[in-house]
Image (cartoon, grey):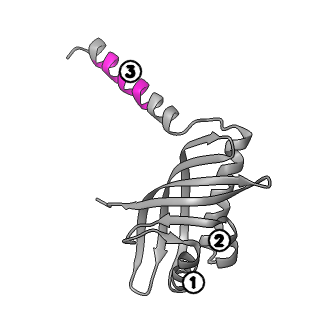
């Protein structure tokens, strides 16, 4: 392949990468999208700080979620019971969450995002990656997480 063809191929690859990054990580969110995202960020912050009450206050009373290894979805009461155990046995060293998509229709937001978490339990430290989709409902001017579905991604 001659130099001009190689330059053209490289230019196309760079363009595709930039386009893909723009689609995955939009530069500007609307104020409403930012508000919904702030609720997810706040919930993760409470979770990482092991603040069960703060974490639960981000969830709607009718919350239902289906998490990594759970055979069935959990309601808010069941989640509280399990999280009280997990919050006492795991330490979060660092986490990062990145929004991929935030779609809002009326008072409902669907937020998809990735997280990277370095956590430690009684056995070991573990760096994990997960993908999530949360449904938020805006009630009385406040976004609350109504539903959450997530899965850990396999590490190579």
Residue 29 to residue 7: above or below: below
Q: Which residue is mark 1?
A: 84
Return the residue nearer the eye: 52 or 144: 144
* Tally of marks: 3
Was residue 9 drawn as part of the magenta stretch in this picture? yes
Question: Quadrant of residue 142 in the image?
Answer: bottom right
Label 3 or label 2, whichever lies nearer to me, is: 2
Q: Which residue is mark 3?
A: 11
Residue at x 43%, y 24% (from the top left corner): 15
Q: CA distance from mark 3 to mark 1?
A: 52 Å
Q: Position of residue 90 (x, y in %)?
A: 50, 81
Q: Which residue is mark 2?
A: 55
Quadrant position of the C terminus in the picture: bottom left
Q: Main secondary structure of the magenta part?
A: helix
Q: Which sits earlier in the primary sequence, circle 3 or circle 1?
A: 3
Return the residue nearer the eye: 7 or 134: 134
Q: CA distance from mark 3 to mark 2?
A: 46 Å
Q: CA distance from mark 2 to mark 1?
A: 11 Å
- Magenta stretch, residue numbers: 6-17
Q: Which sits earlier in the primary sequence, circle 2 or circle 1?
A: 2
Q: Please indicate, yes or no, whether residue 38 appears anywhere in the rendered image.
A: yes
Return the residue nearer the eye: 94 or 49: 49
State yes or no: discs 3 and 1 in contact (Cβ < 8 Å): no
Q: Which mark is residue 69?
A: none
Q: Position of residue 45 (x, y in %)?
A: 64, 66
Q: Position of residue 139 (x, y in %)?
A: 74, 55
Secondary structure category for the residue under label 3: helix
Crowding at mark 1 (Cα within 10 Å: few <14, some 14-19, many 20+): some
Residue at x 32%, y 60% (from the top left corner): 154
Quadrant position of the N terminus in the picture: top left
Was residue 14 drawn as part of the magenta stretch in this picture? yes
Q: Residue furthest left?
A: 1
């Amino acid at each position: 392949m001659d130099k001009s063809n190689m330059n053209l191929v490289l230019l196309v690859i760079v363009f595709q990468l930039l386009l893909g990054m723009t689609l995955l990580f939009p530069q500007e969110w609307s104020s409403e999208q930012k508000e919904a995202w702030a609720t997810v960020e706040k919930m993760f912050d409470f979770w990482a700080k092991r603040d069960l009450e703060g974490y639960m206050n981000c969830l709607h009373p009718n919350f239902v979620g289906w998490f990594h290894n759970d055979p069935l979805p959990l309601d808010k009461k069941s989640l509280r019971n399990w999280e009280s155990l997990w919050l006492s046995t795991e330490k979060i060293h660092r986490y990062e969450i990145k929004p991929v998509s935030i779609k809002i229709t009326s008072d409902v937001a669907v937020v998809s995002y990735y997280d990277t978490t370095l956590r430690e339990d009684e056995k070991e430290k573990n760096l994990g990656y997960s993908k999530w989709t949360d449904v938020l409902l805006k009630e009385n001017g406040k976004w609350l997480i109504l539903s959450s579905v997530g899965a850990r991604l396999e590490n190579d």
